Image: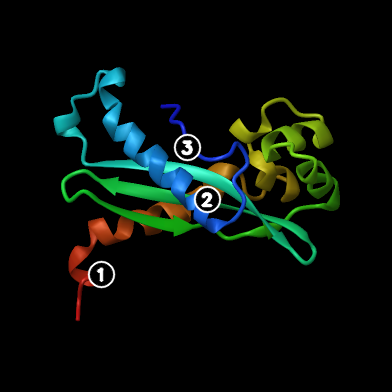
Amino acid sequence: MRAPSLVADQPVGDEETKRGAINRAKYCYQNCIKLDVDPNHVVYTLGLEGGIKDTDKGYECFAWISVYDVTSDEINSCRTASFELPQGLTRLLKTGVELGTADDMLYKRVNGKQGSGTVGILTGGVIDRTEYYRHCAILALAPFAQPEVHNAG
């Protein structure tokens, strides 16, 4: 489901990026009926938002994944690993271009953010965006799947 993040097209920093992921997760639950899904059968929804952060070397890229537990009305979020972006991408980002668009412009791709993503092209396909997000999604879900472990002590 396409879910609005209600943040900038290219979020900058952890706070804005995480807020976008949370907004997307909540939107998915609130609008699941549009997919002909009975909201009473939904347990979790996930939201994902990619962001950038200015560093002393340029920009780094990362994402936040938020899980909304419908039954408890709780949210848990996890941040992916981050990686430095090449100077060509950084230059485009500094002009206000969103990362997916900058990636397409620099590497002559079409909608690469829906394919292997920036991480895919920068790793030569060793890590695509699905793999990049996989561990983060599992970790964001873990407290709900294993509450007795996460609430111990």
Residue under label 2, please give it: 16
SS at mark 1? helix
Who comes first in sequence, dot 1 or dot 2?
2
Residue under label 3, please give it: 5
Who comes first in sequence, dot 2 or dot 3?
3
Q: Which residue is at 25% across, 22% downward? A: 33
Q: CA distance from mark 2 to mark 3?
A: 10 Å
Q: Which residue is at 30% across, 26% downward? A: 31
Residue 135 seen from this side: yes
Who comes first in sequence, dot 1 or dot 3?
3
Label 2 crowd (10 A; few <14 / some 14-19 / many >=20): many
Q: Position of residue 70 (x, y in %)?
A: 21, 43
Q: CA distance from mark 1 to mark 2?
A: 26 Å
Q: Name which quarter of the figure residue 55 lies in.
A: bottom right
Residue 115 seen from this side: no
SS at mark 3? loop
Disc 1 residue type (three-letter): His
Disc 2 residue type (three-letter): Glu
